[in-house]
Amino acid sequence: MLMNELERFRALIVSGCAAERAETCTELEGAGYDALAFLDCAGALSWLEEETPDVAVLSSSEAPVCAELVCELQARCVDLVVDGQPLDGTGAVDLRFRGPRF
């Protein structure tokens, strides 16, 4: 049995907007991820004390994305999408950008 048959990939979602969290969870679960969503960076950072997601989708629609969370995810080589834009690993994205959704 292949590893992905035993364990699904995990997705972390952080958004201050409940509807956006629900929609993003639904989209990612439909793509085969186990999605877990948080209202803010504090909750996500607490979860990161014991877990590492495969992908993180962060939104600044209600509040700015916290740099501490982005840095921690980058340090763990997590694929990041911030406000609908992939973060390329260099941090070369304006975290206040409000682009299209994931």
Image (cartoon, grey):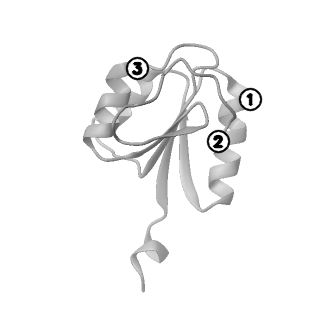
- Numbered mark located on residue 102 in the image: 2
**Which sits earlier in the primary sequence, circle 1 or circle 2?**
1
**Which sits earlier in the primary sequence, circle 3 or circle 1?**
1
Disc 3 from disc 2: Cα separation: 22 Å
Residue of label 1: 19
The residue sitting at 44% across, 67% down in the picture is 7
| Residue 76: quadrant of the picture | top left
**Which sits earlier in the primary sequence, circle 3 or circle 2?**
3
In the rendered view, tell whether residue 86 sits above or below residue 96: below
Disc 3 versus disc 2: nearer the observer: 2
| Residue 19: quadrant of the picture | top right
Amino acid residing under circle 2: Phe
Amino acid residing under circle 1: Ala
Residue 78 coordinates in the image, percent (x, y): 37, 46
- Numbered mark located on residue 3 in the image: none
Label 2: how many Cα within 10 Å (few below 14, some 14–19, many 20+): some
Residue of label 3: 42
Residue 66 coordinates in the image, percent (x, y): 41, 18
Looking at the rendered structure, the secondary structure element under dot 3 is: helix
Quadrant in which the C terminus appears: top right
Disc 1 from disc 2: Cα separation: 14 Å
Looking at the rendered structure, the secondary structure element under dot 1 is: helix
Describe residue 7's horizontal placement relative to residue 74 as left or right. right
Q: Residue furthest bottom?
A: 1
Label 3: how many Cα within 10 Å (few below 14, some 14–19, many 20+): some
Quadrant in which the N terminus appears: bottom left
Label 1: how many Cα within 10 Å (few below 14, some 14–19, many 20+): few
Amino acid residing under circle 3: Ala
The residue closer to the viewer here, 71 or 100, is 100
Describe residue 43's horizontal placement relative to residue 96 as left or right. left
